[in-house]
Image (spheres, coloured by chain):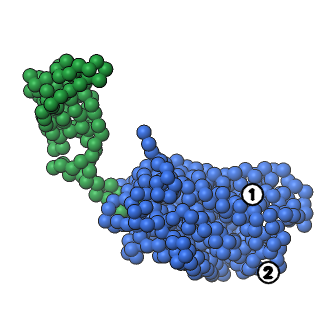
Chain colours: A blue, B green
Amino acid sequence: MLLAVDSGNTAWVLISAALVLFMTPGLAFFYGGMVRSKNVLGMLMQNMFAVGLVSTIWAIVGFSLVFGDSGNGWIGNFDFLFLADVTNLDGDIPGMAFVAFQMMFAVITPALITGATADRLKFGSYAVLIGFWSLLVYIPGAKWVFNGWLLEMGALDFAGGTAIHISAGVAALAVILVIGNRKGHGDVPMQPHNLPLTVLGTGILWFGWFGFNAGSGLAADGLAAQALVNTHLAASTGMLGWLLVERWKGGHATVLGACSGAVAGLVAITPCAGFVGGASPLIIGFIAGASCFLALTIKEKMNWDDSLDVIAVHLIGGIVGTLLLGLFADAAVNPVIAENSSEGLFYGGGLELLKDQFVAALVVGVFSFVVTYAIAKTIDATMGLRVGEDAEYQGLDQSQHAESAYTS
Amino acid sequence: MKLITAVIKPFKLDDVKDALKAIDVTGITVSEVRGFGRQGGHTETYRGAEYKIDFVPKVSLATVVDEARVDDVVEAIAKAAATGKIGDGKIWVTNVDRVVRIRTGEEGTDAV
């Protein structure tokens, strides 16, 4: 049904789109500070390039395949090819505002993968990888979760815990299984070259995440304010949870730990942001910070060179948030829960929602793994996904882009 | 002519510079260097993983002086750079065959 355009809601969604866009360069700096100085431009480039490529794909076909009204819960259609006719969308904001907001989500999702594959992807192959990944993994997942069968089943995902963080986290694992570990991984120290950049990136991510979560209700209302506060509180206690466990286990509260814990809290609150209230965001963030720190050991045990811990932060953080929503979802915060789903276990809804959350996490995770692995294997067999040994030692900045980050 | 090279703790650079200025040494050249010696390195922790950092940051400084002044200069550097703790650094002296001041073309002691 076409409603009159609400100027307040429209303004907030447009601002939120800009905030979410800003997260991608934020992520670039978050990751860029953690790599070695010979790879920092390569990392920044992979993230910035996602803005250019994925936005283009989104305009041509992506939006239509997620939000085109095909009548089925699996995939959209071609009604909105090249963003034609989006003015006919439902709601009280212009269709184009919704397009812009959703576009920025599509952009940052494949960029999350770059943390795991740091320092060793061939640039051209990376471009092909995220192009196909957007089409074959992100688009179907986003359709199911935001506008399709998982939503209809009763699974809740306010801003993308499954379709974004679990999907990208699992994809990160699939790609590193194809490309292998960095040369010298485990033998030579590969410590972060510029943590101040990482702190800067964390600040930008935190700031942008207000648009990501508080914009996802597509309205400038009380729920947006609740989501914004939830987001902020979960980031805060995520930091505390990570630092406490880190200090207890390793003896120091580190700067990188504070940043990582905040991001872990932000990841976990993403699916919950508009569905929980009261003390829940504090608890969710804290559990996420502590459990993501403990999840760092997974990669060591498995000998996976998940270089910048996409699995520990995004996959585990995404799972934690998605499942905790099954405990903490509160219809008093958002009546949609009672209408289309069930409340969390702690709010009298029984195990129904927790089960749906588990199914959604599993389905999106398994789907992302299988398809991402197939895409990565195919690219690796045809054009080669990983740089040669010399190029890797030289660093991506010079070997892939013929540039240097730091010159005198 | 002698080249005096010293590798010292970075935070001692200003003390050494002041000590050399006080005895009228007319110039030094400073580089930031890394190295290992008996002091050993340190560990850093990133996301729970410990990294052993063997190379310690040091400052290397070099100055060319007339042979007669070598003992005074070495003594001034050693006194100013000393903390008494391991890792204070080293000083060594090498022969210099020729020195030229680029602007004037002066050579030898006149060029220092």
Whether callout 2 and callout 1 share a subunit is answered yes
Residue A340 point in image, percent of width and height: 76, 75
- Indicate left or right for A371 with A391 as reference: right
- The alpha-carbon separation of the residues under discs 2 and 1 comes to 24 Å
What type is the residue that disc 1 sits on? Ala
* Mark sitting on residue A338: none
Residue closest to the eye, A301 or B59: B59
Identified at 56% across, 64% down, the residue is A124
Identified at 20% across, 21% down, the residue is B107
Residue closest to the eye, A375 or A9: A375
Query: What is the quadrant of residue A339 in the picture?
Result: bottom right
> Mark 2, residues whose alpha carbon is within 10 Å: few (<14), some, or many (≥20)?
few
Q: Which residue is mark 1?
A: A100
Image: B85 above or below A178? above
Chain letter of mark 1 equals: A
What type is the residue that disc 2 sits on? Asn
Residue A193 point in image, percent of width and height: 41, 51
Q: Secondary structure at mark 1?
A: helix
Identified at 28% across, 33% down, the residue is B30
